[in-house]
Image (spheres, rainbow, N blue to C red):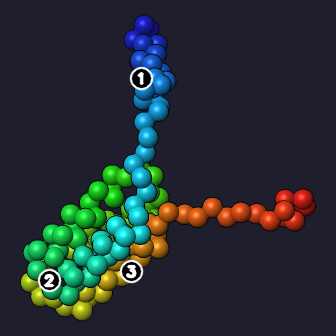
């Protein structure tokens, strides 16, 4: 019975710790960073070389561990990571898959802009 109460107490102590709670999130990726990943993916699509595909994967990989990015952004990043591999033949389907994921990267992963409501909508 003591073990049953010990686990929640330990978790509460760890999660309730101010040092744990005050950790700052890494900064949101800038438009320039997203554009660099996008261009690297386009290069991988076009060149189908180990250097260009490795560059795209290396640039995109840290976004998967970013705590603030939404799931739909991580889905696009995952697609870039999976598709940006060297293939035996650089066919149209491969290039289109990489290009489609790269095109969505800047729209899905950019920092959301907060809308300001006009005063007339607030008074309703």
x and y, in percent, of residue 52 in the image:
16, 76
Q: CA distance from mark 1 to mark 2?
A: 47 Å
x and y, in percent, of residue 33 in the image:
34, 67
Identify the secondary structure beneath mark 2: loop
Image point (9%, 84%), residue name: 88
First in residue order: circle 3 vs circle 1: 1
Residue 92: image quadrant is bottom left
Residue 94 relative to residue 68: left or right: left
First in residue order: circle 3 vs circle 2: 2
Q: CA distance from mark 3 to mark 1?
A: 41 Å
**Residue that label 3 marks:** 103
x and y, in percent, of residue 3 in the image:
39, 11
Residue 73 relative to residue 95: left or right: right
Identify the secondary structure beneath mark 1: helix
Q: Is residue 6 above or below residue 56?
A: above
Image point (50%, 63%), residue name: 111
**Residue that label 2 marks:** 48
The residue nearer to you, when weighing 11 against 105, is: 105
Residue 69: image quadrant is bottom left
**Residue that label 1 marks:** 14
Image point (44%, 66%), residue name: 109
In which quadrant of the rendered image does the C terminus lie?
bottom right
Identify the secondary structure beneath mark 3: helix
User: How many C-alpha atoms fall within 10 Å of the one at disc 3: few (<14), some, or many (≥20)?
Assistant: some
């Amino acid at each position: 019975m003591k073990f049953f109460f010990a686990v929640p107490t330990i978790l509460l102590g760890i999660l309730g710790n101010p040092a744990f709670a005050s950790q700052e999130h890494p900064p949101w990726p800038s438009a320039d960073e997203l554009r660099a990943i996008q261009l690297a993916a386009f290069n991988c699509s076009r060149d189908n070389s180990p250097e260009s595909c490795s560059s795209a994967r290396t640039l995109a990989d840290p976004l998967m561990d970013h705590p603030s990015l939404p799931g739909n952004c991580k889905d696009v990043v995952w697609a870039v990571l999976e598709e940006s591999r060297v293939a035996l033949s650089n066919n149209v389907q491969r290039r289109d898959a990489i290009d489609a994921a790269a095109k969505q990267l800047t729209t899905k992963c950019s920092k959301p802009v907060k809308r300001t409501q006009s005063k007339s909508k607030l008074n309703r």
